[in-house]
Image (spheres, rainbow, N blue to C red):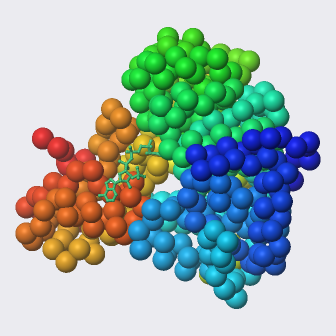
Amino acid sequence: MRLIDSPDLPDAVVTPSGSLSRHQLLEQASRVAGRIKGAPIVAVDAVPDLSTIVAVTGALLAGVPIVPIPPDAGDLERAHILRDSGAALLAGSDISEISPGRPRLDAALVLYTSGTTGAPKGVVISSEAVEAGLDALAEAWQWTAEDTLVHGLPLYHVHGLVLGVLGPLRLGCRLIHTGRPTPQAYAANPGTMYFGVPTVWSRIAADPAAARALAPARLLVSGSAPLPAPVFDDLAALTGQAPVERYGMTETLITVSARADGERRAGQVGQPLPGITTRLVDESGAPLPSDGTTIGHLQVRGPTLLDGYLRPGGVRPPDLTDGWFPTGDVATVGPDGWHRIVGRASTDLIKTGGYRVGAGEVEDALLLHPAVREAAVIGVPHPDLGERITAFVVAGPVAPAELIDFVAGRLAVHKRPRVVHLVDELPRNAMGKVQKSFLTED
Ligand code: MLC
Ligand code: AMP
């Protein structure tokens, strides 16, 4: 990815542990680039800190694809990502041996994300896709080098890493990373743009003093999960401006957004970004009307789509029909092009705190516990997290808290069930398949 060639900027990157001017960042990143040049792929321990930003910038300079690893990934998830990607691990100033055998990828990033079943998959994203995605957002949000972006999101997903770090690198704007996305940290750091997932915005809206401190900003941006209308309204009232919502996913980057110079509507995520087209289709793939009421499967097409999924021998391209990517989301589209995301087609992908978590991955982790015989995991609507991971488990004598800690120790901590119900049996149909619609908390 081409980085903007701009004059030095003191405090170009600010984090709780220190800051760097643009020249200092490039100097440190060049040292990293020198060490990893020629590596097929490099994994970065994505601690929310300067070291990750330096490592990512270095890999971009060296043209080496990056696999960010959640810093709290448990042993199972971490081992899977390292083995599956074949990456050498870059941690602080150390680099482990570069593993041979992995063919060189023509990509900027490999982001691991959950599917409905099995372990997370490596999504291969090209530099061209990242550039197209960021340039489209820059146009829609009037995002320039004059901006100061503030956020505290994790540095291993599209939101915090691609938009939140590569965005400032490409556009040459200041970045303040607050370490954690707390209302207090956002309020304490003046900026022109703030990024958050709905859980972050709902916590800010619940802290009126923090929300009011964001009033001077130019843009409050929400994405990664549905923003509840009451949070939208509260933010508008407290800050004097309605948030800008945008929609996307790991495989497509951001494809739909409200504009800085346009309308903002509660419960809607905006219009397709420049270069992106979208359509609704029915179960058989036949196009449906954009009349604002017909609900269909949302497909997207454009330059921001993934190259494919990482496989041992190379990259498996996604299953596209005439270039259309099936998002797995159901939506309505109005005659004016405004999109409303209704939900996901599969209940087995859970959105919790803006994180995407596959029910199957959590069930597999629970089944590794010696006391567990059967497990079914669902997302239950929750005011703070959007959905709360909830497990129904048939097990021998074991405390729910032990099972929660068991998962937290093996997968990234946010994938742990927040609630475990011990049950005598799971509801199954005649074929023996678990009927998740019968799982309720009462
Ligand atoms: C709690 N903790 C435990 C634990 N229980 N640790 C070990 N074992 C247990 N049983 C610890 C955690 O490690 C953490 O420590 C602390 O408790 C709080 O963790 P939490 O309860 O999980 O945090 P929570 O407050 O619920 O987090 C809310 C949140 C978070 C909003 C901050 O969900 C978040 O950062 N979300 C962002 C997700 C995101 O960026 N998604 C983008 C996907 S890209 P400690 O020390 O760390 O506090 C995408 C595309 C697009 O979707 O459109 O953008
Ligand atoms: P991820 O793969 O983690 O990038 O998650 C992508 C998913 O997050 C999408 O398929 C949507 O279900 C959801 N999502 C992202 N942004 C929004 C939004 N603004 N409103 C509703 N859902 C969203």
Q: Is residue 72 visible?
A: yes
The spot of residue 46 in percent (x, y) is 58, 60
**Relative to residue 294, is residue 42 depicted above or below?**
below
Q: Residue at x 77, y 75 (%)?
A: 36
Quarter of the rendering occupied by the N terminus:
bottom right
Q: Quadrant of residue 335?
A: top right
Q: Quadrant of residue 313?
A: bottom right
Quarter of the rendering occupied by the C terminus:
top left
Say which of 189 and 147 sits in front. Answer: 189
Left/right of residue 361 with respect to residue 309 in the rendered view: left
The spot of residue 117 in percent (x, y) is 41, 65
Say which of 148 and 2 sits in front. Answer: 148
Q: Residue at x 42, y 74 (%)?
A: 75
Left/right of residue 362 with respect to residue 297 in the rendered view: left
Q: Residue at x 40, y 49 (%)?
A: 350
Q: Quadrant of residue 215?
A: top right
The residue sitting at the bottom extreme is 100
Left/right of residue 12 with respect to residue 404 in the rendered view: right
Q: Residue at x 70, y 52 (%)?
A: 305
**Relative to residue 15, is residue 46 depicted above or below?**
below
**Relative to residue 45, is residue 427 depicted above or below?**
above
The spot of residue 175 in percent (x, y) is 70, 40
Q: Is residue 242 visible?
A: no
Left/right of residue 314 with respect to residue 132 in the rendered view: left
The spot of residue 244 in percent (x, y) is 61, 25
**Relative to residue 358, is residue 93 depicted above or below?**
below
Say which of 129 and 290 sits in front. Answer: 129
Say which of 417 and 45 sits in front. Answer: 45
